[in-house]
Image (cartoon, rainbow, N blue to C red):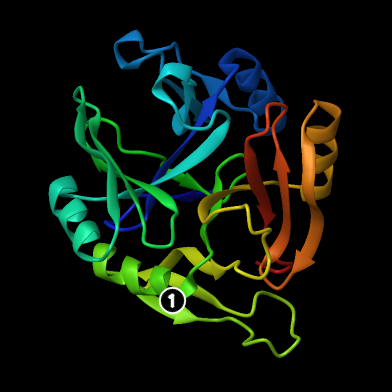
Amino acid sequence: MSEYSAPAGAPVWFDLMSSNPAKAAEFYSAIFGWEVEAPREEFGGYQNFTKNGRRVAGLSPWMEEAGGPPNIWSVYLRTDDAAATLAAAEAAGGSVMVPPMAVGDEGTMAVVTDPAGAVIGFWQPGLHHGFTQWGEHGTPYWFECHSKDYAKSIDFYPKVIGARLEEIGTGGDGSPGPDAYSQVFIGDLSYSGIMDTSKLSPPEVPSFWQAYVTSDDVAATVAQVESLGGTVLMPAEDTPYGTLATVTDPFGAAFSLGHPPTGM
C-alpha cells in the first residue's frame, strides 16, 4: 500500500449513488473488505466506506426527486479554491452543474460537465481529506476520462487543473491499447488518464469518468462479482498497464478493477 495525499488537480475522492445503499454496502464489503460509517442524516444519508480504518470512498442514496441516473460512480478532483476552479472550467467551455457548496466542515464540493459531456466533481477538503491509500486491494488503482470528443477533453483539463498531458496512445498502428490516450500529470506523477472512446463505446454511451479499484486477483474478483449478482462488462485482460476488468455491482453501477503488471 502507498500512502496518498492528493495534490491539487489529482483525484481525491469517488462515490457511489445507489438505489439500495444497504445491499450495495454488503456487496462492496464482500469484494473489497470495505466497512461503512453510519449515515450522516444532515448530509442526506451520505456514508463513507472505510478500508483499514480510513475513508476510501462514499455512498449516497439515490433520490428520485432530485433526478439524474441511479447507481453510478462519480469522481472528484482536488481543488484548493472551488470557486476559482469553476470559473476556469466555464472559461474553458465547461458548464456548472453544482456550484460550490459547503458540506458542513467536511469541505466544499462542486460539479461541472466538461465540453465533451463528462461529469466531473471537485472537492476542496476541510475535515474530510478524501482517500489516503493507493494500490492495495480495495483502494484506488487509476482514474480515467472516457471521452467522446478527445480534442475537447485534452484542451479542457490542462486549463482547469494545471495538468501536463503525455500522449501514450498507439496512434492507430494496431498495437494493443487505445489509439488516442493521454496520461494526466500533476507535477511529476500521474494518477489519471484521458482516453478517446469515440470508436470504442456505443453512440448512446456518453463521455464519463471511470474509477479503477485495485484487486489482488482480478479474475477472482470478477468471479466473485458474478456470484454476488453483478455483471461483467469486460473480463480480466492482461495489458501493458496491468490486468484490467470492468464490472457492475448488482444494481448496475459500473467500475473497473486493476492489478499492476508483473514486476511492479
Q: Is residue 5 left or right of residue 139?
A: left
At label 1, the amino acid type is Ala
Foreground residue, 128 or 156?
156
In the picture shown, does residue 134 fall above or below 131? below
Residue at the farthest front position: 203
- Quadrant location of the C terminus? bottom right
Residue 168 in the image, given as x and y percentages of width and height: 55, 81
Residue at image point 72% right, 43% down:
247
In the picture shown, does residue 200 fall above or below 85? below
Residue at image point 55% right, 42% down:
139
In the picture shown, does residue 105 fall above or below 219? above
In the picture shown, does residue 15 fall above or below 194? above
Residue at the farthest bottom position: 173
* The image quarter in which residue 259 lies: bottom right
* The image quarter in which residue 47 lies: top left
Task: Please give the residue where the numbered disc 1 appears in the rendered image.
Answer: 151
Residue 108 in the image, given as x and y percentages of width and height: 22, 35
Foreground residue, 124 or 114?
114
Query: Can residue 187 be spotted in the picture?
Result: no
Residue 228 in the image, given as x and y percentages of width and height: 80, 26
Residue at image point 79% right, 37% down:
231
Foreground residue, 2 or 22?
22
